C-alpha cells in the first residue's frame, strides 16, 4: 500500500511521536468498542447513558456490575499485534508517548511504558464519597453479566466507583495538560482506532496538526479526524500497524 510506505517514511524520520489510541486498537483482542451495541444484561441500555455519574447514582448495582463484567473480559484477553507494534514504535523512536482513551491495560501488557490514560482505568476503583483509592475486587463475573452492589469504602463506607472519567466529569488535569503539551511538541501523531467524537480528547490530534505535526490515522471506517489526518490508513490496527513498523524499520523487524 502506497500510503503505508509514505507513513513509514515519515514515522522513521520522526524524533517525537505521539501515539493516540481509542477502543478500536483493543477490538481485535476481543474487547467490544465503546460504540458497539451492548449485549447480555445490558442489551437494552446505551453505553453513553451508562457512563455517567447520574446512572451510577440512580442504579449503582447496574453500573458497577457492567464495569466489573468489562474488567473480567479484559483480564481474559491479551494484547494484539496492534498493541505490540505501538510498543515497537516507542522502542524505536527517541521521544515518544502513548496517550490512550482506553480504560483497559493492554498497552501496559504489550510493553508500552507509562501510557497516559485520559479517561482513567478499570483497575483503579475509588470511593465515590471521599475519593480514596479502593482495592481491585478479586472475583470473576459470569459471561451474561449481573447486577452487583459496589463494595463499601473502608474509610467512610461510601460506595466504591470505577476509576474512569464519565460524561460531564473533568479529565485528570495533569494528564490532560501533559497530553496537550506532547501534542504541541511532536513531529508525528498516529491516531488509532478512535471515532474522534469525544471531547476534549478529540482535540489532541487537532492540536498536533495545528502545531505542524503530520497526523497519520489508522481506522477501517471514516471519522471526523479524516479531515485532520495528512495520511489515512484504512484498515484494522492489528493488520496495518505491524506492516507500518516493518516498512519503517526493515532492518530491525
Ligand atoms: C478500529 C477497529 C480496529 C474498530 N482497528 N480501528 C465539545 C463539543 C461537544 C461536546 C463536548 C465538548 N466538550 C465536552 C463535551 C461533552 C462530552 C463529549 O465529548 N460528548 C460528545 C459525545 C458529544 N465530554 C465530556 O463530558 C468529557 N468531560 C468534560 O468535557 O468535562 C468538562 C468539565 C470540566 C471541568 C469540570 C467538570 C467538567 C468527559 C468525556 C469522558 C468520556 N468517557 C468515556 C467512558 C469511559 C469509561 C468507560 O469506558 O465506560 O470514554 S466515553 C467513551 O468514548 C470512552 C472512550 O474512551 C471514548 C472515546 O471512544 P473511542 O475510543 O473513540 O471508541 P468508539 O467506540 O467511539 O470508536 C471506536 C473506533 O474504532 C471507531 O472509529 C471504529 O471504526 C474503530 N475501529 N475496530 C482500528 N480493529
Ligand atoms: Zn470513602
Image (tube, rainbow, N blue to C red):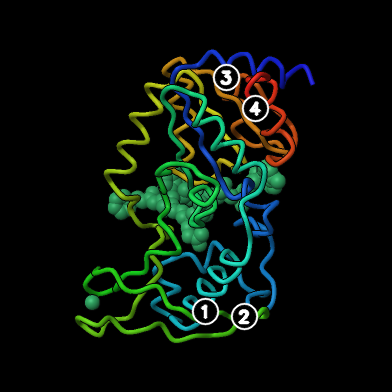
SS class of the residue under badge 2?
Answer: loop
Q: Report which quarter residue 174 is drawn in.
A: top left
- For the residues labelled 4 and 2, say whether their Cβ atoms are less than 8 Å apart: no
Is disc 4 surrounded by few (<14), some (14 to 19) or many (20+) residues within 10 Å?
Answer: many
Nearer the N terminus, badge 3 or badge 2?
Answer: 3
SS class of the residue under badge 4?
Answer: helix
Q: Residue shown at 47%/18% (left/top)?
A: 187
SS class of the residue under badge 1?
Answer: helix
- According to the picture, the residue beneath numbered tag 4 turns out to be 245
Nearest to viewer (mark 3 / mark 4) = 4
Coordinates of residue 188 in the picture (x, y in percent): 51, 21
Give the distance between the C-alpha atoms of the residues marked 1 and 3, in whole angstroms. Answer: 42 Å
Q: Compared with residue 237, is residue 41 higher up or lower down, i.e. above or below?
A: below
Give the distance between the C-alpha atoms of the residues marked 4 and 2, in whole angstroms. Answer: 38 Å
Nearer the N terminus, badge 1 or badge 4?
Answer: 1
Nearer the N terminus, badge 1 or badge 2?
Answer: 1
Nearer the N terminus, badge 1 or badge 3?
Answer: 3
Instruction: Say which mark, if any, is on residue 65.
Output: 1
Give the distance between the C-alpha atoms of the residues marked 3 and 2, in whole angstroms. Answer: 42 Å
Is disc 3 surrounded by few (<14), some (14 to 19) or many (20+) residues within 10 Å?
Answer: many
Q: Is residue 222 left or right of residue 215?
A: right
Is disc 1 surrounded by few (<14), some (14 to 19) or many (20+) residues within 10 Å?
Answer: many
Amino acid at each position: 500500500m502506497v500510503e503505508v510506505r509514505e507513513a513509514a517514511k515519515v514515522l522513521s524520520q520522526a524524533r517525537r511521536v505521539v501515539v493516540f489510541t481509542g477502543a478500536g486498537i483493543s477490538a481485535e483482542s476481543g474487547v467490544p468498542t465503546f460504540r458497539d451495541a451492548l449485549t447480555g444484561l445490558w442489551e437494552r441500555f446505551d453505553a453513553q447513558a451508562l457512563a455517567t455519574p447520574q446512572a451510577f447514582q440512580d442504579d449503582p448495582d447496574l453500573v458497577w456490575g457492567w464495569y466489573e463484567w468489562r474488567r473480567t473480559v479484559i483480564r481474559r484477553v491479551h494484547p494484539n499485534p496492534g498493541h505490540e507494534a505501538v510498543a515497537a514504535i516507542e522502542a524505536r523512536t527517541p521521544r515518544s508517548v502513548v496517550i490512550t482513551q482506553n480504560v483497559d491495560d493492554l498497552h501496559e501488557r504489550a510493553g508500552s511504558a507509562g501510557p497516559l490514560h485520559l479517561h482513567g482505568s478499570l483497575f483503579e476503583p475509588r470511593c465515590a464519597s471521599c475519593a480514596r483509592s479502593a482495592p481491585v475486587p478479586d472475583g470473576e463475573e459470569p459471561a451474561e453479566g449481573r447486577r452487583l452492589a459496589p463494595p463499601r469504602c473502608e474509610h467512610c463506607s461510601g460506595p466504591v466507583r470505577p476509576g474512569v472519567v464519565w460524561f460531564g466529569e473533568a479529565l485528570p488535569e495533569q494528564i490532560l495538560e501533559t497530553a496537550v503539551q506532547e501534542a504541541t511538541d511532536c513531529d508525528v501523531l498516529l491516531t488509532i482506532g478512535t471515532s474522534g467524537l469525544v471531547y476534549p480528547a478529540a482535540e489532541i490530534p487537532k492540536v498536533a496538526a495545528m502545531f505542524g505535526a503530520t497526523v497519520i490515522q489508522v481506522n477501517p471506517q471514516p471519522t471526523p479526524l479524516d479531515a485532520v489526518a495528512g495520511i489515512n490508513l484504512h484498515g484494522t490496527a492489528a493488520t496495518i500497524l505491524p506492516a507500518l513498523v516493518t516498512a519503517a524499520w526493515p532492518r530491525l523487524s
